[in-house]
Image (cartoon, helix red, strand yellow):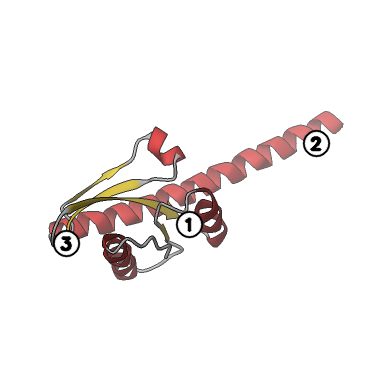
Amino acid sequence: MKEVERLKQRERRFRGREILEGIGLRSEREVEKVLQDLKNKKKIRDFAPSNNFNDKKGKDFFIVHCGKKEYYVIPIQVKSSKTGQRIHMEKHPEVPSIRVERKHLAILEYQIMRIITNFEKGRIIHV
């Protein structure tokens, strides 16, 4: 009986992890849509998703932005919850983050532009 219960608990944890990973991937896809739109509007020069190594260092995307005097490569972390963002801020305070949580794409665009503007001024923000 104990073995069956242990297997059920393990299965519930696995399903929970799958659901969370799915939410995170959906959030990243939404941010990727916004970044592509910003590139098409020529508000950013380019962007690239990070590789697995950089993702573990708290970076989901790199944004290439042409400022008034120089180019900037801005790392950004995408989060889908307040808790996830808080943990990111503790582990990687040097990497700006954006929390998606069912926001309209126009709001995400505004927040990404705030991250870029603040980064140019030497400030790291988490929105």
59 or 37, nearer to the observer: 59
Marks 3/1: CA–CA distance: 24 Å
Mark 2 or mark 3, which is nearer to you?
3
Residue at 56% across / 53% down in the picture?
87
**Can you name the residue that lies furthest to the top here?**
3
Marks 2/1: CA–CA distance: 31 Å
Amino acid type assigned to the residue bearing label 1 in the image: Ser
In this rendering, position of residue 107 left or right of residue 68: right
Amino acid type assigned to the residue bearing label 3 in the image: Lys
Quadrant hosting residue 57:
top left
Q: Earlier in the sequence, mark 3 or mark 1?
A: 3
Other-residue count near label 1 (Cα within 10 Å), few / some / many at <14 / 14–19 / ≥20: some
Residue at 50% across / 45% down in the picture?
21
Question: Any mark on residue 80, and which?
Answer: 1
Label 3: which residue? 43
Residue at 80% across / 32% down in the picture?
4
Quadrant of the frame with the C terminus: bottom left
Describe the element under mark 3 as helix, strand or loop. loop
Amino acid type assigned to the residue bearing label 2 in the image: Glu
Quadrant hosting residue 116:
bottom left
- Count how many numbered circles sit on residues in the image: 3
User: Label 3 near label 2: C-beta < 8 Å?
Assistant: no
Q: Give the percent coordinates (x, y) of residue 63.
A: 26, 51
Describe the element under mark 1 as helix, strand or loop. loop
Label 2: which residue? 5
Q: Give the percent coordinates (x, y) of residue 112.
A: 31, 62
Residue at 13% across / 62% down in the picture?
68
